[in-house]
Amino acid sequence: MRGALSALLACVCISAAASSGALVAPLESVGLRSIAGWLKVHGTDGFLGADVADAIGIPHESGAELIAARQRGFRDAEVLRIAQLVDGEYLLFVVQAPGEVYFYLSTIRGGLRKAVVASRETVTPLEAAEAESNFGREVLYWERKVAQ
C-alpha cells in the first residue's frame, strides 16, 4: 500500500503544484455536484494510480495503470488538499498533513463511501463519526473554493 500511496501523491502533487469501508450517511449531494461541476470546468488534467483506485474502491478498466481525473489542489501552511473527479462519478478528497494522509471517497449522488488515513506504512479506516465529520469539513472547504 505504501507504493500505492506514493504513486497517488506523486501524480496528484505534481499536477496540483502546477496550476471506513462502511457506508456513511450521505452528505447533501448538492455540494458534491457543485464541486464536481467546478472540477470539470476549472480542474486540470491529472491521474490516479490504478493501485490506489483498487485500494480505495474506484472501479476501472482492467489492465489500466493510470486513471484520468480532473483535479485541483491547494496548499495552506503545512496542509495540501486535493480534490479529484474520476470517471465523472467519484470524488476523491486527499488531505496531506505532516505524518499522515487522509483519503475520502464519495460518489456525487451518494455521499461518503470510504474514509481512510495513511500513516507510516499503515492504512486505517476512520471511525464513522470521525469520517463523517472530517468529510463534511472537506466538502465545506471545497464549496468555499467553488464560490470564489
Image (spheres, helix red, strand yellow):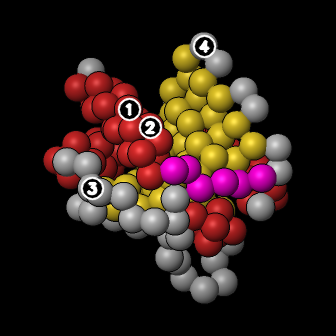
Q: Is residue 64 left or right of residue 19?
A: right
Does residue 17 sit above or below 82 in this rendering? above
User: Which residue bears the numbered disc 3?
Assistant: 26
Give the SS element for disc 2. Answer: helix
Q: Amino acid at mark 1?
A: Arg
Residue in view at x 75 percent, y 43 percent: 119
Most common SS among magenta residues: strand
Mark 3 packing: few (<14 Cα in 10 Å), some, or many (20+)? some
Does residue 67 sit above or below 19 in this rendering? below
Residue in view at x 19 percent, y 48 percent: 28
Does residue 88 sit above or below 31 in this rendering? below
Q: Is residue 67 visible?
A: no
User: Which residue bears the numbered disc 4?
Assistant: 77
Q: Is residue 119 visible?
A: yes
Instruction: Point out the tag, 3 or 1, that comes first from the N-terminus.
Output: 3
2 and 1 marks in contact (CB < 8 Å): yes
Q: Residue furthest bottom?
A: 62
Q: Amino acid at mark 3?
A: Pro
Q: Amino acid at mark 2?
A: Asn
Mark 4 packing: few (<14 Cα in 10 Å), some, or many (20+)? few
Does residue 10 sit above or below 17 in this rendering? below
Q: CA distance from mark 2 to mark 1?
A: 5 Å
